[in-house]
Image: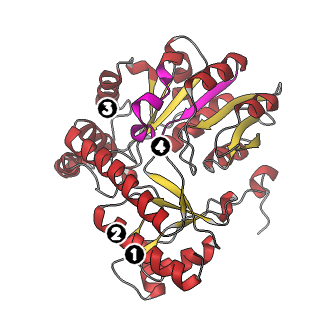
């Protein structure tokens, strides 16, 4: 069969999905493994969300609420913004795609940093646009270099804040100076997937820019702090005009019923949310201290994950730890061949990680 495919699609490399945990265990002949590679919530979903979803299962023959009315109203109330300034998506991923669909024409340009979230570039390529990736500077967004990359074809700038994989944030003074130099027709997207974990005095107030008619969009998700990664529900905060354009390209029923119900219940479960916040903070402090004792270098992070310089081949270390039933993320694909990234886990998971790391480092003679 000879298919005629657009050149920008023909040249794409599919997003590389990881293998299911059960398959990895089968391949390596292990059981009871722990996964600290995907920045998930180790304390699981809110019990209130699980109960609400169970009660809703008998209504799965009905279409979802296409407007996400109740979840939108609850978010607007919690965040003290207008319902019309919220766009819900099948994960914040979808909102990224909606922004690209609405505001980028073939041949136009988006600017991102490198390394950063891979899907920015994927959505742009599907649309027939181009991506200009600016290397991080000392593991932070190089805002000055990004400004220098702006051309007449630039339409969107994506800044993940905190950055994935480095866990760094943009300071308010630096962002203000940056935004003052960005032309008004360019949308600056602050991807705040991990904003819940950021120290209060380190957070950018994205809505303060939006309500003052600055070209800013903020992205949020229920996948991390709220533990609903499997339901795929996220949202964008933006001015109502921008939201209106996204609704023009948004598919009907894009957020399924269980995602809406689960997210609404999770939003009201402050006990589970605070458990996640405390567990993450305590775990980060303990892990960083223990990793340092082993001769590795942990990097400070404003997220639920952090980078570790293992002073050796991270891919080899990943394989060694996988054999011990501990799954981490090697970072050579991000340009850090001696780094791994780990998610903060439960107390038991963190202890097992440290013990396995110690064994692996000795076996590989890295430290």
Q: Which residues are magenta?
A: 182-207
Distance between the alpha carbons at the discs numbered 2 and 3: 37 Å
- Marks 2 and 3, the one that precedes in the sequence: 3
Q: Is residue 360 above or below residue 37?
A: below
Circles 3 and 4: CB atoms closer than 8 Å? no
Residue 320 lies, in percent from the top left, at 53, 81
To which quarter of the image does residue 191 belong? Answer: top right
Question: In the rendered view, does 192 fall on the left or right side of 128?
Answer: left
Residue 69 lies, in percent from the top left, at 32, 28
Residue position marked by numbered label 4 in the rendering:
302
Say which residue appears at 51% left-offset and 27% top-offset. Answer: 247
Camera-side mark, 1 or 4: 1
The quarter of the image holding the C terminus is bottom right
Q: Secondary structure at mark 4?
A: loop
Residue, far top:
212
Q: Secondary structure at mark 3?
A: helix
Residue position marked by numbered label 1 in the rendering:
355
Distance between the alpha carbons at the discs numbered 1 and 4: 24 Å
Q: Which of the numbered marks, if any, corresponds to residue 351?
A: 2
Residue position marked by numbered label 3 in the rendering:
71
The quarter of the image holding the N terminus is bottom right
* Residue 361 visible at all: yes
């Amino acid at each position: 069969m000879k298919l005629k495919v657009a050149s920008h699609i023909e040249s794409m490399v599919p997003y590389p999905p990881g293998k299911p945990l059960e398959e990895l265990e089968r391949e390596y002949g292990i059981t009871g493994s722990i996964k600290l590679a995907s920045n998930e919530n180790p304390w699981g979903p809110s019990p209130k969300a699980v109960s609400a979803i169970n009660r809703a299962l008998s209504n799965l023959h009905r279409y979802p609420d296409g407007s996400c009315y109740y979840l939108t109203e609850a978010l607007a109330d919690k965040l003290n913004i207008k319902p019309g300034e919220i766009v819900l998506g099948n994960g914040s991923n979808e909102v990224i795609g909606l922004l690209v669909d609405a505001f980028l024409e073939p041949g136009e340009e988006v600017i991102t940093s490198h390394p950063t979230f891979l899907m920015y570039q994927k959505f742009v390529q599907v649309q027939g646009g181009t991506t200009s990736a600016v290397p991080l500077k000392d593991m932070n967004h190089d805002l000055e270099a990004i400004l220098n990359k702006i051309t007449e074809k630039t339409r969107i700038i994506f800044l993940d804040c905190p950055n994935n994989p480095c866990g760094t944030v943009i300071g308010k003074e630096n962002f203000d100076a940056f935004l003052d130099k960005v032309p008004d027709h360019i949308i600056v997207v602050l991807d705040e997937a991990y904003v819940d974990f950021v120290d209060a005095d380190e957070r950018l107030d994205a809505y303060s820019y939006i309500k003052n008619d600055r070209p800013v969009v903020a992205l949020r998700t229920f996948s991390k702090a709220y533990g609903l990664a499997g339901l795929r529900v996220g949202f964008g905060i933006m001015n109502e005009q921008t939201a209106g354009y996204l609704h023009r390209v948004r598919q009907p029923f894009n957020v399924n019923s269980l995602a809406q119900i689960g997210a609404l219940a999770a939003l009201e479960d402050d006990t589970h949310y605070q458990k996640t916040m405390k567990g993450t903070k305590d775990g980060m402090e303990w892990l960083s201290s223990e990793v340092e004792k082993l001769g590795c270098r942990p990097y400070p992070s404003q997220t639920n994950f952090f980078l570790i310089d293992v002073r050796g081949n991270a891919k080899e270390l990943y394989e060694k730890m996988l054999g011990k039933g501990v799954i981490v993320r090697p970072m050579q694909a991000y340009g850090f061949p001696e780094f791994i990234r780990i998610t903060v886990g439960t107390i038991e998971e963190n202890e097992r990680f440290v013990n396995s790391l110690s064994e692996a480092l000795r076996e590989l003679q890295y430290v």
